[in-house]
């Protein structure tokens, strides 16, 4: 009797984070009008590990070792040079940061999708509009699951933690 080898489907993980807020408040202000959900998916084994290692190495080069308080790349902190990003006030460090981050991203092996909703237009179009975050999430998951089907692969999803109530809604 011969032994048949069962091949496993490739496994991918989608990581999701948002930019903007999910409320319908202050929509006349550009900074509050849009919500973007960015998703990146990696093959779970080697591709993600290589990216995570490269990113941690990059952060150690720019910020030094910080085992007690790891540096989290938040856009507003980077732009405003707050907290550990104060080192970016130095032009040479700022240049190294930009160059190094682009290098890490350009060498990474992942797929990316971004879903953006104009909340003002959404609110005007629908009498009872769908929650903006969940609207973007549904579109993103549709894209991810379609891609998985196309590749005959399987996957799971990790979303960035939000506030307590939003995390409960997401679950």
Image (cartoon, grey):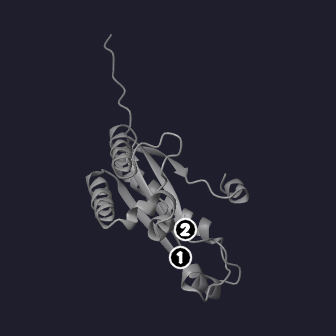
Residue at screen point 53% across, 49% down:
158
Q: Circle 2 sits on which residue?
A: 136
Question: Going by the picture, which residue comes out furthest to the top?
Answer: 1
Q: How far apart are marks 1 and 2 (CA)?
A: 7 Å
Q: Quadrant of residue 32?
A: bottom right
At mark 2, the secondary structure is: helix
Q: Where is residue 118 in the image (x, y as percent from the top left)?
A: 54, 81
Vertical comparison of 70 with 25: above or below? above
Disc 2 residue crowd, few under 14, some 14–19, many 20+, Cα 10 Å: many
Using the rendered view, name the quadrant where residue 48 is placed: top left
Percent across and percent down for residue 65 are: 42, 42
Residue 81 picture location, percent across and down: 46, 66
Instruction: Judge left or right: residue 80 versus residue 51.
Output: right
Give the camera-side residue of 128 and 38. Answer: 38
Find residue 149 and name its label.
none
Residue 117: which numbered mark, if any? 1
- Quadrant including the N terminus: top left
Judging depth in this view, the residue of 60 and 16 nearest the camera is: 60
Residue at horizontal 37%, vertical 46%?
Answer: 60
Give left or right: position of 148 versus 130. Answer: left
Residue farthest along the right direction in this orientation:
165
| 19 to 154, vertically: above or below | below
Give me the residue at 48% from left, 52% from top.
15
- Asked if marks 1 and 2 touch (Cβ < 8 Å), the reply is yes
Q: Which sits earlier in the primary sequence, circle 1 or circle 2?
A: 1
In the depicted view, which residue is nearer to us: 32 or 98? 98
Left or right of 101 on screen, residue 130: right
Mark 1 neighbour class, 10 Å CA radius: few under 14, some 14 to 19, many 20 or more: some
């Amino acid at each position: 009797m011969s032994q048949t080898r069962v091949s496993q489907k490739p496994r991918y993980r989608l990581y999701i984070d948002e930019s903007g807020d999910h409320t319908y408040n202050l929509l006349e202000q550009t900074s509050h009008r849009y919500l973007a959900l960015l998703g990146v998916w990696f093959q779970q084994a080697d591709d993600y590990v290589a990216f995570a290692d490269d990113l941690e190495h990059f952060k150690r080069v720019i910020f030094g070792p910080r085992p007690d308080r790891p540096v989290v790349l938040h856009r507003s902190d980077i732009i405003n040079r707050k907290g550990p990003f104060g080192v970016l006030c130095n032009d040479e460090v700022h240049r190294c940061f930009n160059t190094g981050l682009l290098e890490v991203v350009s060498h990474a092996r992942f797929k990316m999708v971004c879903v953006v909703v104009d909340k003002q237009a959404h609110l005007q179009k629908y009498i009872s509009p769908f929650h903006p975050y969940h609207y973007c999430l549904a579109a993103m998951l549709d894209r991810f699951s379609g891609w998985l089907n196309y590749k005959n692969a399987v996957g799971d999803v990790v979303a960035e933690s939000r506030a307590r109530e939003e995390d409960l809604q997401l679950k």
